[in-house]
Image (tube, rainbow, N blue to C red):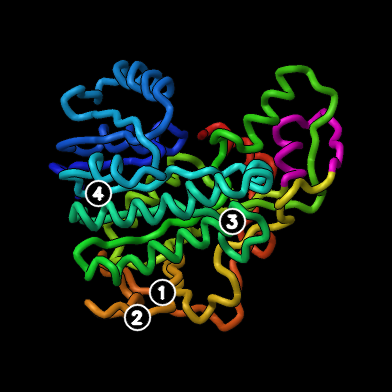
Amino acid sequence: MLNGKSVLITGGTGSFGHRYALTLLERYSLKRLVIFSRDELKQYDMEMKFKQYQSYDSNIMRFFIGDVRDMIRLKEAMRDIDVVIHAAALKQVPAAEYNPMECIKTNIHGAENIIQAAIANNVEKVIALSTDKAANPINLYGATKLASDKLFVAANNMSGGRTKFSVVRYGNVVGSRGSVVPFFEKLIREGKKQLPITHEDMTRFWITLQEGVDFVLKNMERMQGGEIFVPKIPSVRIVDLAKAMAPNLPIKIIGIRPGEKLHEIMCPSDDSHLTIEFEDHFVITPSILFFSRENDFTSNSLGEAGKVVAQRSEYSSDNNPHFLNIDEIREYNEKQ
């Protein structure tokens, strides 16, 4: 699928970018792999780390310092690129609440720049990473990612079908930067006497970093352009997570943080008429028509067939039929 292709990853020095880049180098014979990000130190650290891997090839891997807010730099970086994975974002929920303008510049204006640069360079495919917080958002981060999702879906009309744009939406990534698992691990190492939890009923979707990477890769094969892909993944109760990580430590309820939800949603009931269920994933189809091609999403490019879900049905972390028990949570955490 990607053999002989040139791939660019925005936000490539983050948790996802690291794992995605390594997976690409291990599985495919790429023509070029471009890591696009703002931080020169993270790029240097990533390059030093990747030089230790057998799959590393300095003739293939390139590092571009740049910001998705900078259209000119993006156009330069995407020259002769076939596939773009857009992972760059400001994603810390409380930070976005206190710095809304900065979040908008990166997550919304940055998405617009990605679209314009990809179209200008005739990129074949663009997949943008989204979040469960973009479904029925109550915080600024979620609202910016919903706007970003809408931009990438609509971009399929802007490109006239030459460049295909799709979105991948999933939940909390086990062990990624800023997630609760490394935070709890830090408190346990420091010998804290209790673990803080914002609410005793809180639930979250749960996915490992590699599962997220593999889902994105699979959807690159499935995509026609315009889909929001949602994986079927388990949920966890945050109380159970604390018990799995530190069974002997008490829990302290500290209250919900600014912008935080009690439960997360990935397929809202208001989108049920647009949602198609497949064996291992859902697709939220566009609410707009594409004028350059057919608009049937009940089957995909791999020949997989799905069916429209029941009206008003919703896929959320609290009504998920698959919850991990404490032992399963421990197993998941070991995969990170």
**For the point 37% across and 69% down, which residue is it?**
154
Q: Type of residue at label 3? A: Gly
**For the point 32% across and 56% down, which residue is it?**
115
Residue 29 seen in the current view: no
Q: Earlier in the sequence, mark 4 or mark 2?
A: 4
Q: Earlier in the sequence, mark 4 or mark 3?
A: 4
Q: Which residues are magenta?
A: 238-254
The answer to the question of whether label 4 and label 2 lie on touching residues, with beta carbons closer than 8 A, is: no
Q: Earlier in the sequence, mark 2 or mark 3?
A: 3
SS state under label 2: loop
The answer to the question of whether label 4 and label 1 lie on touching residues, with beta carbons closer than 8 A, is: no
Mark sitting on residue 83: 4
- Residue 122 magenta-drawn? no
Query: Is the residue marked by circle 4 packed among few (<14), some (14-19), or many (20+) residues within 10 Å?
Result: many
From mark 3 to mark 1, how far is it between C-alphas? 19 Å
Residue 319 sits in which quadrant? bottom right
SS state under label 1: loop
Residue position marked by numbered label 3 in the rendering: 142
Q: Type of residue at label 1? A: Pro
Establish if 69 lies above or below 234: above
Query: Is the residue marked by circle 3 packed among few (<14), some (14-19), or many (20+) residues within 10 Å?
Result: many
From mark 4 to mark 2, how far is it between C-alphas? 24 Å
Side (left or right) of 25 relative to 209: left
Establish if 281 lies above or below 81: below
From mark 2 to mark 3, how far is it between C-alphas? 25 Å
The answer to the question of whether label 4 and label 3 lie on touching residues, with beta carbons closer than 8 A, is: no
The location of residue 109, given as percent across then percent down, is: 44, 53
From mark 4 to mark 1, how far is it between C-alphas? 21 Å
The location of residue 304, given as percent across then percent down, is: 32, 69
